[in-house]
């Protein structure tokens, strides 16, 4: 099968690893970026291209695409050009992937589905953050589009932290605001692929940080979490319509709560044998989704064929 992987960026270690596993499993693999996607006139129709070749030459695209904050429209266009190619399976399609980029949208949908999300507010002013502080004590503020713990900040006292609050409000306009849940023993990151949870990490913040992101120096332990966390994560991925997801859970006085839904989970902090298991399952599960889709479409096609 010809499989394309939309990589996050040049430094993304997970996409080349996925490609390498795909090759070992006998597939023809290519890694590219959203920037490599374009379109051209092909006899009256606009044909989607990847590095100048017709995207229709691929069977399956696995997306780990980066939607850049400052170029969201261009990036969306390129992604959607891919999603519109007849017969090409893109997992996940642009609309599904884009919706799952937003922390607000994810938490809203998961909460509405009855899943245990952390209490969350949308704060557009220092006064709103002040009232969250009054209700919750210490809070965390962060951008709705973000990753790696960047611009995720703790606020204890509005007066003392005013410069920080004003700076983030000026940069993003509105912020995700949640109670602060200390987690010196780490979070729980459940990685879902299809209906499976092939990788579960407990990410412990570095001594100099309070954030559980690998980019902030956290270390990862491979663990078996309470079964209900796996079930919640599976349901969360289904609610979002996402094929590969990363659920971030923090311990709270009310049990584990989802603080964030990720559409492009990384696995590079995991040991090699775990990474190998994960990448094999990603390729196998994505291929089987493509195959069952093709079977359904092929069948539908047969039904449309005129009776001789
Ligand atoms: N409400 C919270 N309470 C305590 N820590 C938090 C909270 N929200 C985020 N964090 C910490 O900050 C890290 C990054 O926040 P997260 O919401 O996962 O955004 P992202 O990973 O997209 O930057 C989390 O892994 C966690 O360690
Ligand atoms: Mg996170």
Image: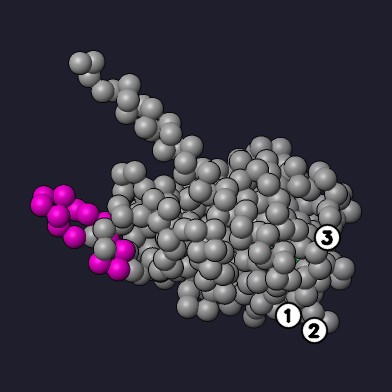
Please tell me which residue is depicted at 42% across the width and 66% down the height of the picture: 30
Let me know if residue 102 is in the magenta part.
Answer: no
Left-right relation of 133 to 99: right
- Discs 2/3, front: 3
- Mark sitting earlier along the chain (1/2): 2
> What residue is disc 3 on?
223
Left-right relation of 203 to 303: right
Q: Secondary structure at mark 2?
A: loop
Please tell me which residue is depicted at 50% across the width and 64% down the height of the picture: 23
From the image, which quarter does the C terminus lie in? top left
Q: Which quadrant of the view contains residue 52? A: bottom left
C-alpha distance separating marks 2 and 3: 23 Å
Q: Which residues are magenta?
A: 40-52
> What residue is disc 2 on?
208
Do callouts 2 and 3 mark residues in contact (Cβ within 8 Å)? no
Residue 35 placement (x, y as % from top left): 35, 69
> What residue is disc 1 on?
217
- Residue 122 seen anywhere in this rendered image of the structure: no
Q: Is residue 306 depicted above or below 145 in this figure?
A: above
């Amino acid at each position: 099968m010809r499989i394309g992987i939309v990589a996050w960026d040049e430094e993304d270690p997970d996409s080349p690893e996925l490609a390498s596993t795909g090759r070992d499993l006998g597939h023809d693999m290519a890694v590219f970026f959203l920037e490599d996607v374009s379109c051209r006139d092909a006899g009256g129709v606009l044909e989607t291209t990847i590095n100048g070749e017709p995207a229709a030459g691929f069977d399956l695209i696995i997306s780990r695409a980066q939607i850049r904050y400052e170029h969201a429209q261009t990036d969306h266009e390129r992604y959607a050009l891919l999603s519109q190619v007849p017969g090409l399976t893109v997992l996940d399609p642009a609309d599904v992937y884009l919706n799952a980029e937003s922390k607000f949208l994810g938490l809203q949908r998961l909460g509405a589905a009855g899943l245990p999300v952390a209490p969350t507010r949308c704060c557009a002013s220092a006064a709103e953050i002040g009232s969250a502080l009054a209700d919750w004590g210490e809070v965390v503020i962060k951008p709705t589009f973000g990753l790696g713990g960047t611009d995720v900040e703790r606020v204890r006292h509005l007066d003392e932290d005013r410069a920080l609050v004003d700076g983030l409000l000026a940069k993003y306009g509105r912020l995700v605001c949640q109670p602060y849940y200390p987690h010196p023993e780490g979070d729980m990151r459940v990685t879902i692929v299809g209906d499976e949870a092939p990788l579960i990490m407990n990410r412990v913040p570095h001594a100099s940080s309070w954030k559980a992101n690998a980019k902030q120096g956290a270390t990862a332990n491979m663990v078996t979490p309470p079964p209900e966390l796996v079930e919640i994560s599976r349901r969360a991925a289904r609610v979002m319509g996402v094929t590969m997801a990363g659920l971030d859970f923090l311990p709270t006085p009310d049990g584990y709560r989802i603080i964030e839904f990720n559409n492009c989970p990384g696995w590079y902090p995991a040991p090699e044998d775990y990474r190998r298991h994960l990448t094999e399952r990603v390729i196998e599960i994505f291929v089987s989704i493509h195959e069952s889709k093709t079977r359904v479409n092929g069948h539908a096609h047969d039904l449309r064929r005129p009776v001789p």
